[in-house]
Amino acid sequence: MVVYQDPVTGYEIRRYTEGPERNAKLYFTCENFSADDRYFFFMKQQLNDGRKELSGGCYRAEADTGIIERVTDDDYRGFATDREKNIGYTCKNETEVYAVDLSTMEMKKVGDLPKGGQITGHLTAANTGRIACSYHLANKYYGLVILDPGKEAEVVYQSDYRLGHAQICPADENLIFYIHETEGDAFQRTWMFDVKERYVRPYYVEHPSEWITHEVWAADGTEMALMKLDPAGPVDGEKGETHSGNIIIGDKDGRHFDVVASSTQLLHPCFSRDHKWLCADRISYLGTRVQEGVVLIERATGKSRLIATTGHCKTGADHQHPSFNRKGDQILFSNPDENGIAQVCVIDLKQVWQNW
């Protein structure tokens, strides 16, 4: 672990890894810390002759000491942590689902996903223990799959669209959010599936001029944050900034939405567990280059501040994807190094709040 002072913001940052491997935090749509905030988790991807990427598995780092231990090996993917329990979920050999005790790292098989397929994101779990994911089926359709404790996995929805970013509602096992993945804009990206009724509907209904992306449940499942991109957004006269990233928060049912923050080049938003704070990465995209980094936003006022600067991302896997620890006083993020490869860092927010 290396402690350094951010050259732009002046805040103290802790960096836990260094290349040449990619060390990327878990995606921002799941918890990244253990229930007691002692550990955070990240994925290591090793490079072979600088060309072929090989998965190095999931690792955990002790936040205070920087001690790193391996959690899973190359046979596992889709690792994610439970919103409440001190458990992680991962998939072995594409279809075998395991629960991981985040204190002891003991693993227990809990079921199997449909044969011949593979997940298209990470696993997610509701507070009842139901696991859900988006899935590329053996028949080459895409689908949503649920796995209830003690039962066989069930394909509850199929589509010829490429489905991704599936997130079961943490507090309602009946709702599964997912997207139509185009790797860019979509006519209608966000969808909500009702498991009991086998009914699918748009979540945020898009107009032709809108670009919606990067959605995430709050930890208690009461609302979602998403990003609305606006390449020709309004200009802040005082700062000379174009507000091209607008964080929108919608209720659980997708009936009411509010723009809660606007700033330059925001992309991936995330809640603190008390809903009072938001964070997002600031990234160069749509032909605009900026100083990339992490932005902290006070939800009540919409006030935002760049709190950490980073290198330029080489790929989407190297994006900063910031998210809070469970207490809400630290932000974990990936910081692309001089080669654009992600390395995991943490900023303690108490130093930021002193002069907020």
Image (spheres, rainbow, N blue to C red):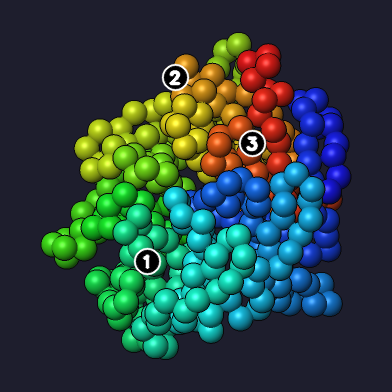
Question: Which is nearer the eye, 35 or 2?
Answer: 35
Image coordinates of residue 225 in percent, x first then y, are: 41, 39
Q: On the image, which quarter does residue 204 sit in?
A: top left
81 versus 274 height, above or below: below
Q: Which residue is mark 2?
A: 300
Q: CA distance from mark 2 to mark 3?
A: 19 Å
121 versus 66 height, above or below: below
Image coordinates of residue 75 in percent, x first then y, are: 61, 81
Q: Residues within 10 Å of mark 1 (few under 14, many from 20)?
A: many
Q: Which residue is mark 3?
A: 330
- Judged left or right of residue 91, residue 204 is left
Q: Earlier in the sequence, mark 3 or mark 1?
A: 1
Q: Mark 3: which secondary structure?
A: strand
- Judged left or right of residue 326, residue 95 is left
Q: Which residue is mark 1?
A: 131
Residue 115 visible in the current orientation = yes
